[in-house]
């Protein structure tokens, strides 16, 4: 994988998640890693710090390519798969229980990169 996330991005995202009452775990994968179709019993909140990843959301047959600063709120029980981009990926992920979240709000997400 290439250099780290843009300056201050991880700190800003962690602060935002803390304001939402969430605690994030950092994870990474090498280029081309594939996640088969699966689902979670919790809502997933995921930010990309570095690299890229493409999610396939199987219920609506949507594809979502994410890069640094992008956020995805995936409701519990949503079938999805993923493929890591050519530069690998580093993410922060939190779990939300309770009310379901909506999938990706790019207007809010893109501001994290600034």
Image: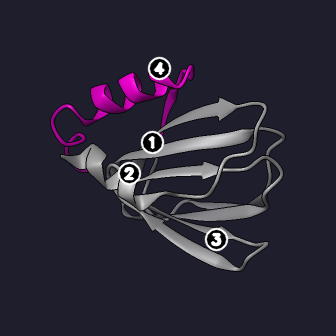
Binning the other alpha carbons within 10 Å of mark 4 as few (below 14), some (14 to 19) or many (20 upward) gives few
- Spatial CA distance of label 1 from label 2 is 14 Å
Q: Which residue is mark 1?
A: 91
Q: Which residue is mark 4?
A: 18
The Cα atoms of the two marked residues, 2 and 3, are separated by 19 Å
36 lies above or below 95:
below
Residue 46 screen position, x and y as percent: 53, 44
Region in magenta: 1-27
- Marks 1 and 4 sit apart, C-alpha to C-alpha, by 16 Å
Task: Give me the disc on residue 56.
Answer: 3
Residue at 41% x, 60% y is 106
Helix, strand, or loop for circle 3? strand
Question: CA gap, disc 4 to disc 2?
Answer: 16 Å
Q: Nearer the viewer, residue 85 or 12?
A: 12
Task: Determine the image quadrant of residue 93.
Answer: top right
Q: Look at 36% across and 32% down and name the residue there.
A: 13
Cβ–Cβ below 8 Å for labels 3 and 1?
no
| 4 or 2: tag closer to the N-terminus | 4
- The residue at 64%/71% (across/down) is 56
Per the image, label 1 sits on a secondary structure element best described as strand
Task: Give the residue drawn at x 56%, y 23%.
Answer: 22
Residue matched to label 2? 109
Query: Cα distance, mark 3 to mark 1?
Result: 17 Å
Mark 4, secondary structure of its residue: helix
Q: Nearer the viewer, mark 2 or mark 3?
A: 2
Name the front one of labels 1 and 2.
Answer: 2
Residue 63, horizontal then vertical, whole percent: 58, 75
């Amino acid at each position: 994988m290439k250099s780290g996330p843009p300056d201050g991005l991880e700190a800003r995202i962690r602060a935002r998640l803390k304001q939402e009452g969430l605690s994030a775990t950092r994870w990474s994968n090498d280029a081309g890693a594939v996640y088969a179709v699966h689902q979670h019993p919790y809502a997933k909140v995921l930010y990309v710090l570095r690299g890229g990843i493409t999610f396939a959301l199987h219920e609506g047959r949507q594809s979502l390519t994410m890069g640094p600063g992008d956020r995805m709120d995936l409701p519990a029980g949503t079938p999805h798969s993923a493929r890591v981009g050519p530069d690998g990926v580093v993410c922060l992920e939190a779990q939300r229980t309770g009310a379901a979240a909506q999938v990706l709000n790019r207007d809010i997400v893109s501001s994290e990169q600034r």
